[in-house]
Amino acid sequence: MQKLLEGIHHFQSALFGSQRELFERLAEGQSPDALFITCSDSRINPNLLTQTEPGELFILRNAGNIIPPYGNFFGGEAATIEFAVARLGVKDIIICGHSHCGAMNAVMEPQSILDLPALNQWLSFADHTRQVIQDKYADRHGEALLMATIQENVLVQMENLRTHPVVAASLNTGKLKLHGWVYKIETGEVFGYEPNTCQFKLLAEHRNEILVTNRQRIQAEI
């Protein structure tokens, strides 16, 4: 706790002043670009990862970056998604899993959390993830199996997200896009799911491809 208190003091005395105008503007309202859904894991910092400032991301965190299907559980997740899309008008929703995820390890080893009834019930919203893994990845073990679970869970939760009426409506009108990411803690790499190839691809490579495509388009127009 002492470290946290010292951090607050440092923020107020050394950092806040240089960004006073930003915080005064944010006090009048927010207009984030994206809803960022990720795990509660303390090793993930969405703003650091995306190099965004306060006010640019609307963040939803829980164990396992899980989104219950609409109607199954009206909790904070449904309320946050509804507000982000219908009121704040976010243009993108990102579901970001991560390497070494304890929640996904528990999905594959449910006996390890029998003494945690609330967590056990919560992770039931990843039962489909477990089924996919059992059906498709029987030949994988250890870290390879865990990474497959992490990736497949991102895809399962994206499908759950589509069941929310406000999301479905915005997707149909082209006002909203969904993105599935996996962050690798030990390397800093972020992989994005590409529906065309059904693969998670390094986002840095995808960015370079976009730059090349844009450059070619500009040259063709000249």
Image: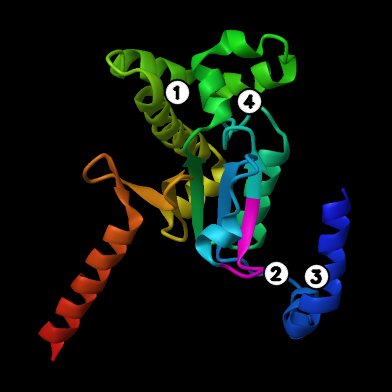
Bin the neighbour count of mark 1 within 10 Å (Cα to Cα): few under 14, some 14-19, many 20 and up.
many
> Considering only order in the chain, which callout, 3 or 4, is on the residue closer to the N terminus?
3
**Can residue 28 be seen?**
no
Residue corresponding to mark 1: 129
Q: How many marks?
A: 4
Q: Which element carries disc 4, helix, strand or loop?
A: loop
Q: Which element carries disc 2, helix, strand or loop?
A: loop
Is residue 17 depicted above or below 74 in this figure? below
Is residue 188 depicted above or below 114 in this figure? below
> Considering only order in the chain, which callout, 1 or 2, is on the residue closer to the N terminus?
2
Identify residue type, mark 4. Asn
Query: Mark 2 and mark 1: span between their CA atoms?
Result: 34 Å
**Residue 25 falls in which quadrant of the image?**
bottom right
Q: Is residue 76 magenta?
A: no
Residue corresponding to mark 3: 11
Is residue 188 depicted above or below 160 in this figure? below
Residue corresponding to mark 2: 30
Bin the neighbour count of mark 3 within 10 Å (Cα to Cα): few under 14, some 14-19, many 20 and up.
few
Residue corresponding to mark 4: 72
**Can residue 26 be seen?**
yes
Disc 2 or disc 1, which is closer to the eye?
1
Identify residue type, mark 1. Thr
Report if the CB atoms under discs 1 and 4 are less than 8 Å apart. Answer: no
Is residue 4 depicted above or below 163 in this figure? below
What residue is at 52 percent from the left and 26 percent from the top? 104
Identify residue type, mark 3. Phe
Disc 1 or disc 4, which is closer to the eye?
1
Q: Nearer the viewer, residue 199 or 170?
A: 199
Q: Which residues are magenta?
A: 52-59
